[in-house]
Amino acid sequence: MRIAVPDLVSNSYFPLVAAVALGVCHEEGLASSIELVSPLTDCVTALRDGLVDFIGVSAHAPLLAFPEWRGVRLLCAQSQGTYWLLVMRKDLAIARGDLAALSGRRIAAVPFVATALKHLLSAAGMDIDRYGIEIVMPDAALKAGVNFGVAAAQALQEKTIDGFFANGIGAELAVSNGVGIVVLDIRRGDGPKQAFGYTMPAVATTERLIEQTPDVAAALIRAVVKTQNWLKRDVRQATAVGKKLFPAQEASLIARVVERDLPFYNAALTESAIATMGQFARDVGLLRGHPSYDDVVASQFRGLWTAK
């Protein structure tokens, strides 16, 4: 089985990556490999075109290649809640949650993530044009194979940007290097309340795979849930994964970042979460209709989400 993620040096899709790297997929009878397919649009398109079998992405990302959820289903969550953090330069001395202080600032974000940031700011009463907030992509992040969070942390250090909205490992790099501070952490209560439900890291596959090989889909869910539980019991395993797949500095930080994520390690895709995500997807133009819960989620596997 070929499994793809759009961001490998990251905590974002770590349960899925670790399930392969730690051999849990193998224990479930899946001969699998993990690969980086970036940018995100290419990752989702690879699933649609049959080049990969599963993807670990933001829960609403399949809509980029599967309009109105036709032909794709979410199998499980990797963790709960919108998982990007807003990090600003430390020397700007912006207080935690002070969105008004973003006026006139230059913030880096990849286009897909920038859409969520713009929507979040709008929900908080801040129109980016009115407040002169510029959302950009650092030049280094445009290079093939470059991890955005890592590139953004470097750009922050070089003061070519004032902040960035990205994954936890990018935030940890900026904070640990002394150049950044977290201004917005949606998972932990910052920003508009509804922003928590915009999305979550999930695993998706095609309707075709589920229909033809439901046992394979079930095995991957079991592997993800086992890995979540394993990391909860011994987060040091995250470092072992990092040493296999990450550069040295990021490998040294990943266990710390994953440990903070552990309270959100829950594989469930609840009806309320899918409804909130659906509204967000409509608000940003990714979805037009109102598909049912079963049109989005492979709910026949929901009994696997709470396995121990």
Image (tube, helix red, strand yellow):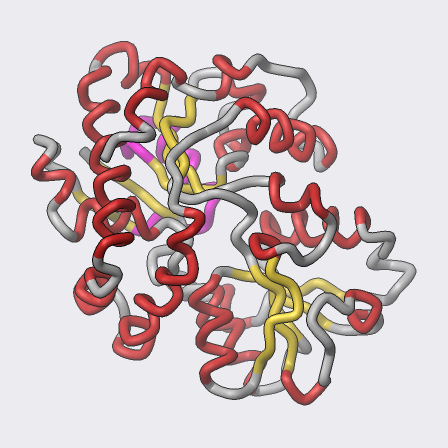
Q: Is residue 68 left or right of residue 222?
A: right
Rendered location of residue 206, percent (x, y): 36, 21
Spot occupied by residue 135 in the image (x, y as percentages of width and height)? 71, 63
Q: Which residue appears at 62% of the width and 40% of the height? A: 198
Q: Quadrant of the C terminus?
A: top left
Is 296 left or right of 308, judged from the image as shown? right
Residue 195, placed above or below residue 283: below
Residue 41 sits inside the magenta stretch: yes
> Horizontal and vertical percent for residue 284?
71, 37
Residue 233 colored in magenta in the image: no
Q: Residue furthest right?
A: 130
Looking at the picture, tell me which residue is in the foreground, 124 or 5: 124
Relative placement, left or right, of 11 versus 291 is left
Tell me where residue 57 sits by quadrant. top left
Residue 268 falls in image quadrant: top left
What is the magenta range? 36-54
The x, y position of residue 305, in whole percent, is 33, 29
